[in-house]
Image (cartoon, rainbow, N blue to C red):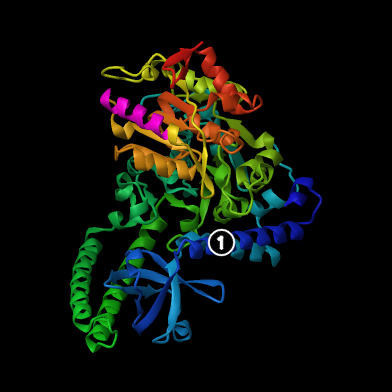
Amino acid sequence: MIFLMMGCYTLSAVVKALREFVTREKSYALQEMIKESKIFNAKILGFSGNVLDLYCSEGWNFEVGDVIGFVEDGDINVFGTVIDANLGIVSVYLNLPKESDGKYFSEERNVRIFEAEPLVSYDLQLNLIERIESGWTNEAVELFFGNPNAKPVNKTYRLTDIKCLGNERRLDESQVEAVENILSLNSGDFLLIIGPPGCGKTTVIKKAAYHLVRDKGEKVLVTSNANRAVDNAIEGLDNHLQEIGCSCVRVGRPEKVDPKLYECMPGSKFDKTLRTKMENLEREIEEAKKERAEILKRSKVSGDSEELRKNSEKLASLYAERNELLKKGVERVVAEASVVGSTIVKSQLYPLAKINFDTCIIDESSQVPITMALLAMIKAKKWVLIGDHKQLLPIFRTVKRQDLQELLSAFVYLLKRYENRSLWLKWHYRSNTQIIEFPSRFIYNEMIEPSPECLKVKLQLRACKLEVLDPEKPIVFVHTRGKAERKGGSLCNKREVEVCSEVVKELVDAGVDEENIGVITPYRAQKRELRSDIRYKRVEIDTVDAFQGREKDVIILSLTATEDLRFAANINRVNVAVTRPKSKLIVVGNGMSIMQNPESILYKFLKYAYEKNAVFDWDWKQWIS
C-alpha cells in the first residue's frame, strides 16, 4: 500500500492492491475462526421445502436468526438463516436459489458450518472491487481514486431554528456551521466533520437528518460499522419525524439493537392487520417447533423419521408464508421511511440492498476502511463523513503500521486529500474541565474547548475513605511498582489488578453505582484478569479499543505495560481512554517506566497530573509533589 502514499500509481494498481489486501484480511479472519474452533462439523440429515436439517454435535453454538455459511475448498458460502436449534439439530431456512439446492445439499453429506455474518463484509467489499476493476465507477469512487479537486462548500442554507432536536439547548456556532453546510450540499458533494469526544456529533446528525427530511424532502441513510453508533445517532429522531408525517426505521438484528429503538424496527411499524396475521403464524410455528422437539426425542436424532420430514415440510410452509408476509411488510416500511439507520453491512443486504438515498451520513468513519465506506456511499448522491482522526483507526489483522492504518481509513484518507472540505466541532460538553483539558492541549492542539458547564461536572460520593477518590481531583495518576507479565500474545499486571479491584470496591462503598464505573486496559490478558478479580457484575471491564464511543462517570485505566510501552502509549488509544470519563479519571501504571519515555503521550499525562498535584504513590500511600 506504500504506492498510495506516494501517489504515483494508476487506478488499476490501487484497486488491485485493495483487492489483495481485503482477500488477505478475509483469509486471516477465516484462519482465526478455525483456530478458535468457530467452524463446526455437521451432517446433512434432510432437505424439504426451503428448510435444511443438519446434525451438529456443537449445535448449541447457533441461535435462531444466525446467518449460516459453510466452507468448501477454502471458499466461504453463505446459505441461510437458523430457524431452530434443538438437541443437535440445526434447521436452516435457505436463501440460495432453488436451482442451487441439489448441488450443495445432498443427504448424508458432511459440511463445515459457521456463523457467517462476521465474514460477509469481505465478500461485499470484494464484489465492489471487482465492479470497479471491470470499469464501473461513480462520483463516490472518484472522490477516493480520482483527481483531488473539490472547492469549499458553497453554503446556501441558513438555519433559523438553532435549538437542539428534543431539548431547549441551542446549538453552538460550530454545530450550526456543520448543519448548514450539510444542508447546502448538492449532488456529488461531500463534507468531512471532525467530531472529537463530547462535542455533540450525534446532536448534529439528528438535527441535519431532520432538516434534510423536513426542508428538502430527502431520504437519508445514517450508518456506521458499529450498531451502537447507529443507535446513538438516531435515538429519538422518529418521534420528531412523526410530527411532520415522516418516519425513521432501524434495520438490524434485534439482539444487536438498543431496546430503546425496538419501536423503530420494521416489525413495530406494521399495520394492525399485518401484525395480527404475523402473530397467528408465529403461534403456529412455535407449535410446529414443539412437535419437532418431541419427534427428535423419539427418533433419537437419527434423521430417518418420516415424522421429521413431514414436520420439516410443515415448518418450511409456515416459514415461507411468514417470510412472504414479512417481506412485503418490511419492504413497504423501508420504502416509506425518510430516515433509515443500519450498519454498513446491513445496508447492503435485504431489505436495503436495492434502496437508494439522497444523503448518506457515516458516523465514526475514522474506523471505517475505504472499501467499506464506499459500500454505503454508492447508495447515495451526497455524503457526510463524521469522524475523529485522533481516535482509533480501523482494526486490521494484517496491517499494524499507523501510517498505513491512516491511509486505509476512509475519513483520514479523505481528510488528507480534501482538508478544505472539513469542519471542526469545537465545544466539549461531557467531561470535567480538567479531564478534557489534557487532550485539548496535548492531542487536539487546543482546537476544542470545554464549555462552561464542564466546570460543574463532579464525582458525587457519600464518603471518601480513599484519597485518590477525592472529587476535587478529577484526574489522578496512581503510581504502583507492578511488573507486566507475558500471557499468551498479550500482557497482564497482577499488581495493577489488585489496585483497580480495591479502587472499584471503594467507589461502590462510597455510593457510586456499579453501572457508572468502567475499568479499561489496552491488553486482552489484563482484561481477563480484571474480570476474574473484580466481583461487581455491573462494572464494565473491557479493552480501550472496545470502549470507543462509550462513556462512564468514572474510568479506571490500567496501563499494564512496564517495559515496551508503544502499544499502551499509542496516542489514538490514549486519547480514547482519557476521554471516556465524565467526572473522574484514574490512571494506574508504573510511573518509573513512563519516565523512561519522555516523548510519549503517557509522559505528558504524568507531567500534567503532577502539575495538578494528582500523582499518588499507592505503595507508600502518599501524594507525590
Instruction: Give the residue at the far top of this rendering.
Output: 625
Residue under label 1, please give it.
122
Q: Quadrant of residue 466?
A: top left
Task: Identify the residue shown where x is 37% and y is 52%.
Answer: 256
Q: Is residue 357 above or below residue 71?
A: above
| Front one among 567 and 267 | 567
Q: Is residue 49 above or below residue 446?
A: below
| Front one among 32 and 491 | 491
Q: The magenta stretch spans which residues?
A: 497-510
Magenta stretch holds residue 503: yes
x and y percent of residue 295 in the render?
A: 20, 80
Position of residue 210 in the picture relative to residue 85 (left or right): right
Crowding at label 1, few (<14), some or many (≥20) Cα neighbours within 10 Å? many
Position of residue 25 in the picture relative to residue 452 (left or right): right
Q: Quadrant of residue 255?
A: bottom left
Task: Identify the residue shown where x is 49% and y is 31%.
Answer: 482
x and y percent of residue 601 in the render?
A: 60, 27
Magenta-colored segment: predominant secondary structure:
helix
Magenta stretch holds residue 609: no
| Front one among 337 and 122 | 122
Residue 475 in view in this figure:
yes
Q: Amino acid at mark 1?
A: Tyr
Task: Identify the residue shown where x is 68% and y is 49%.
Answer: 144
Q: Element under label 1?
A: helix
x and y percent of residue 261 in the render?
A: 33, 46
x and y percent of residue 268 in the render?
A: 28, 54
Residue 447 in view in this figure:
no
